Image (tube, rainbow, N blue to C red):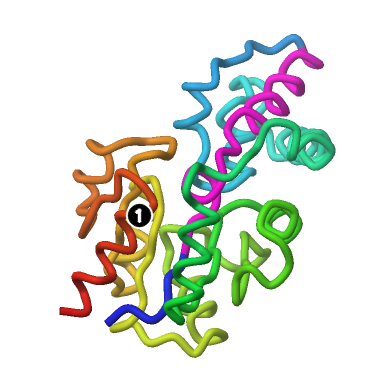
Amino acid sequence: MIKTILFDLDGTLLNTIDDLADAANWVCAQHSWPTFPVETYKHFVGNGIPKLVERFSPAEARTPERLAATLAEFSARYDAHKEDKTAPYPGIPELLAALKAEGIQTAVFSNKADAFCGKIIEHYFGPGSFSLVRGSRPGVPTKPDPAGVYSLMADLGAAPESTLFVGDSDVDILTGHNAGLPALGVLWGFRGEAELTAAGADALAAKPEDILAYLRCEKH
């Protein structure tokens, strides 16, 4: 029986793609680099902000020094505008309230920089909405490496046999499986059914209520 759910952040709980794309394209415009449509950014994100910066930077701007400077530029711009267009997906606040009412422990595990995660979660869901919120931290490999999941589960006191990983991309499905957890893919996020199925998702949710239905099936 599932007692703990670990949620991905971007594309799962919050639709952050417009603010991420706007910040990235703003940086590109400052340097007269090509910009990209939002749909392209849906495939650029998922592996952490340094990887996003690398993906939107042209080949000649990918030296370690230049990428570090661009990362700082992007981070400052995104931090100042990360709440311009971002919003929870429909049904997510209600899902979190229902999980709390059923005594399910919830946490967030994201490849987004740790400094952003806590602030953005508190802004949209309020303080104490999750037992723990954790993003990418120095010295800890990003998803799909399971190291961060193991650390998070140890801090939560969560057992693998009663923990579910929920996300919108193949990275999330692989993260869950690499950590020995079932992984549920959500269809409202950045990637879609084909990618989640190919990655081996144990279940799919077309809407947040489907996660509750999955939990109830697991009880029987």
Q: Residue at x 63, y 14 (%)?
A: 35
Name the side, left or right, on which 89 lies relative to 19: left
Can you identify the residue that label 1 sits on?
A: 209
Q: Is residue 8 magenta?
A: yes
Q: Is residue 115 visible?
A: no
Residue 128 belongs to magenta span: no
Answer left or right for 142 relative to 182.
right
Q: Circle 1 — which element?
A: helix
Placement of the N terminus among the 4 image quadrants: bottom left
Q: Amino acid at mark 1?
A: Glu
Residue bounds of the magenta highlight:
7-31
Residue 163 image point, x, y percent = 36, 77
Apparent side of residue 64 relative to residue 194 in the rendered image (left or right): right
Q: Quadrant of residue 214?
A: bottom left
Q: Dot 1: few (<14), some (14–19), or many (≥20) neighbours within 10 Å?
A: some
198 and 68: which one is in front?
Answer: 198
Residue 53 in sight here: yes
> Does residue 56 lie above or below 36 as drawn?
below
Residue drawn at point x = 60 percent, y = 25 percent: 56
Q: Which residue is depicted at the point 38% across and 81% down? A: 3
Task: Say which quarter of the image contains residue 131.
Answer: bottom right
x then y, percent, for residue 39: 47, 22
